[in-house]
Amino acid sequence: MKIICNWVFGLVLALLAPVSWAQDHGTREEARAMAERAVQHFKAVGAEKAFKDFTTDKATWTKKDLYIFLIAFNGPMMAHGANEKLIGKDMTELKDQNGKLFVQEMMAVAKSKGSGWVDYDWQHPQTKKVEGKTSYTLRIPGYEGFLGVGVYR
């Protein structure tokens, strides 16, 4: 009987784990929608206000583990919803744990295609562990830069 109870308990935990993960982690669809909404906000309020909003307005621009980051094509981070200390820093030479110059790849995707997904490894803002991530990057019309929203894989 004890073996059956342990087995049932384990099965219930296994079934509930994806539900818990889904409640804490954003999806690719949510990331893309947030990025598209952010571009509309940028167009509506202008660059300076958008930079501030994306960085400080957590109620609007941070959902689950999703947040906006915005990088100018000449390198500096202009807004970051999870780490304000990155603002103003040149991101062009930033590498992930595997040596991938992922910001350069994001810039290339935004410039050549207008939008797309870029895979890399990054520290999760909640767990503080390095995890696989993919970010939807979107060029901002009328601005020399792009914004992105990432999903931990």
Image (cartoon, rainbow, N blue to C red):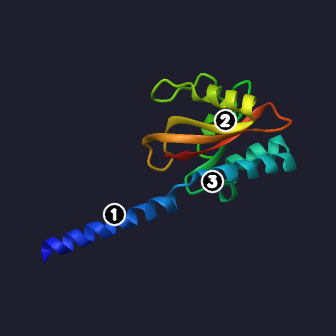
What x and y, as percent, mark residue 89?
65, 28
What x and y, as percent, mark residue 71?
70, 33
Look at mark 3 in the image and give the residue it sits on: 29
Q: Secondary structure at mark 2?
A: loop
- In which image quadrant can residue 1 be found? bottom left
> Looking at the image, is 1 positioned above or below residue 151?
below
The amino acid type, in three-letter code, at marker 1 is Ala
The numbered dot on residue 87 is 2
- In which image quadrant can residue 114 be found? top right
Q: 66 or 11: nearer the eye?
A: 11
Q: Residue furthest bottom?
A: 1
The numbered dot on residue 14 is 1
For the point 45% across and 44% down, which residue is it?
Answer: 128
Q: CA distance from mark 3 to mark 2?
A: 26 Å
The reply, left or right, for residue 87 in relation to residue 98 is right
3 and 1 marks in contact (CB < 8 Å)? no
